[in-house]
Amino acid sequence: MTPLKLQPLPASWEECIQRGWDSIDILLVTGDAYIDHPSFGVALIGRFLEHYGYRVAILSQPRYDSPSDFQRFPAPNLYCGITAGNLDSIVANYTGNGKVRETDAYSPGGNGWRSKEKNKNNRYRPDRASLIYANLARSCYKDTPIVLGGLEASLRRFVHYDYKQNRIRSSFLTDAKADLVVYGMGEHAVLDIARKCQSGKPLQGIYGSCERLTENELNRRFAGWSAPDSNDFLVLPSLTEIQGDKKLFLDAELALDKHSRAGSDKIVLQKQQTHWVVQHPGAKSLTVRELDSLYELPYTRLPHPQSPDVPAYRMIKDSVTIVRGCSGNCSFCAITRHQGATIQNRSVESITRECKTLAASPSFSGTISDLGGPTANLYGTSCAIGGCKKKDCLYPQICKHLVIDEERFLSLLAKVASIDNVRHVFISSGLRMELLLRTPSLLRELILHHIPGTMKIAPEHSSKEVLKLMHKEPHALLTKFINHSRALAKSLGKNLKVVPYVISSHPGCRDQHATQLANDMGKLGLPLKQFQDFTPTPGTLSTAMYVTGLSRIDKKPIYVAKNSSERMKQRKLLEGKNSNPRVRHNDIRATATRKKVRRR
């Protein structure tokens, strides 16, 4: 066997042979072009499994009009892992109003199509990719366990709403007839699965996974699950019940939200059609040492040679992940459901080592584009009492038990800035305003040295009613923050530019609320350069409100802009009040994709 050098994981059987392999242990299939960078989930999982001695190959963006690309690999010895990629495939392929996207930032050249022929079978990524890939894998590897993972499968593991089809769908686990779904950040689970497959043990009871069981299997494995006094199980409304009464969809999502934030050890059950989805407790969060090790694996930090020009790579190549998770619990965001509400911080030393590696790269421009994560300035935060069931650290105000380590963040910035070849260190990820007001030295340092042209904040709206539904802080916070930051910037001789992200057509938002939003931003001198139409994608409470027309707070009816004319009217109200005619409009991706690719 030839010795391993710093090279990408093999992306073809020919590359496997070049390594002297006669078989592979795990085949990872992805809807994205393969980028060997830790911000891309398939690279991170692949390198992690490789670190533990497994032969891992990548099948990137296979054709799905035939099994030919799957047939180029022999059946894996252990299992086939499948992800739609860093985005939900419906979000990747369609706008919030169901229009086909012409571009795909995760495909070669940013093109959503393999050629000029734009038919449904010629996209790089199919609709509901996890299902399509699973069926192709099953047809080729009949005795190989099929494991779904990544953002799409994680957020579609229970009954969910599909906005392109405008209907309630059953779990992808049962639709795909896969063996397991790995949900959340899956490092522990994928390793447990590999070890069980290797030892011939059944794929049962793996933390961070969901199984598919018949009624008889459920009764044999979990006797007493249906007992009314059982504290070991959370039984959600079934697919049939939800289809018969959509109000139950909100009940199910609220129960899942509470369960997820609490880190509950209850087993979650939901009947689909003939099978049950059984969700085991979540895997334990990685320790600081484990998280450090994960991001310091030998990534090439480059695209695989078969797809060199990928826009998402250009955006992320000089960035470094410093934190996981978010305790904001915004209604429209699925981070809590996928990454969790517990904040996981890397060590300053590990981040600095990764930045030194990045700075030594021949292609490094001198600028680290982002030290960030879902919310950059949650880095260094922790809980003084070790956590609670609510994990709502920022709403309606900062929890008294939240420990904010300003000095740790300042130390990180100073150490990274002192690295040879590093001229600029920027924070491009979103920032929480209420935390910045509690960290005056950090805010000063950001304004002076670490904002790449504009500071990105996300007030989302200004209406009291809409903000409550969004689970966001009141508009008064934005006013206080803007006034304070501008005064500070002026005293430092800086001209601070702030870009506010806002959402139109969120459940509960009427035309008058859109007008109020535009007027309120205008009063603060904040042009609406970036706003998003709300898109109801899986795994968020906002989507449940969209589907049911009920408030998450008291379950009373709320207005929901559903048809295109209602949504377009709110958009035009924002555009008409905007002082910049070159307003930029985006579709919100409620699967938590706004803050770059690192959410996976």
Image (cartoon, rainbow, N blue to C red):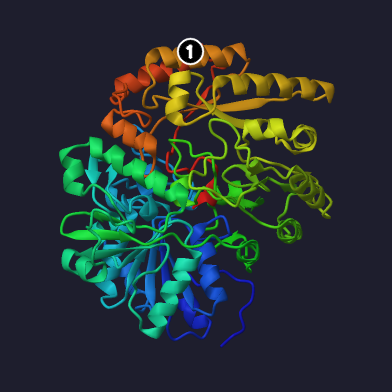
Q: Within the image, what quadrant is residue 70 found in?
A: bottom left
Query: Is residue 67 among what the camera can see?
Result: no
Residue at the front extreme, as displayed: 229
Query: Is residue 590 among what the camera can see?
Result: yes
Horizontal side of 424 relative to 36 (left or right) equals: right
Q: Please state the horizontal and vertical placement of residue 367, each as a whole percent of the image.
A: 74, 46
- The answer to whether residue 21 is above or below residue 188 is below
Residue identifier under label 1: 516
Please, what secondary structure does the residue beneath circle 1 have?
helix
Horizontal side of 180 relative to 40 (left or right) equals: left
Q: Nearer the viewer, residue 66 or 516?
A: 516
Q: Nearer the viewer, residue 235 or 53?
A: 235
Q: Nearer the viewer, residue 399 or 159?
A: 399
Kind of residue at disc 1: Gln
Neighbor class of circle 1 (other Cα within 10 Å; few <14, some 14-19, many 20+) is some
Q: Within the image, what quadrant is residue 229 found in?
A: bottom left
Q: Nearer the viewer, residue 532 or 327?
A: 327
Q: Please state the horizontal and vertical placement of residue 48, each as a whole percent of the image.
A: 54, 69
Quadrant location of the N terminus in the rendered image = bottom right
Q: Please state the horizontal and vertical placement of residue 72, each as a whole percent of the image.
A: 36, 74
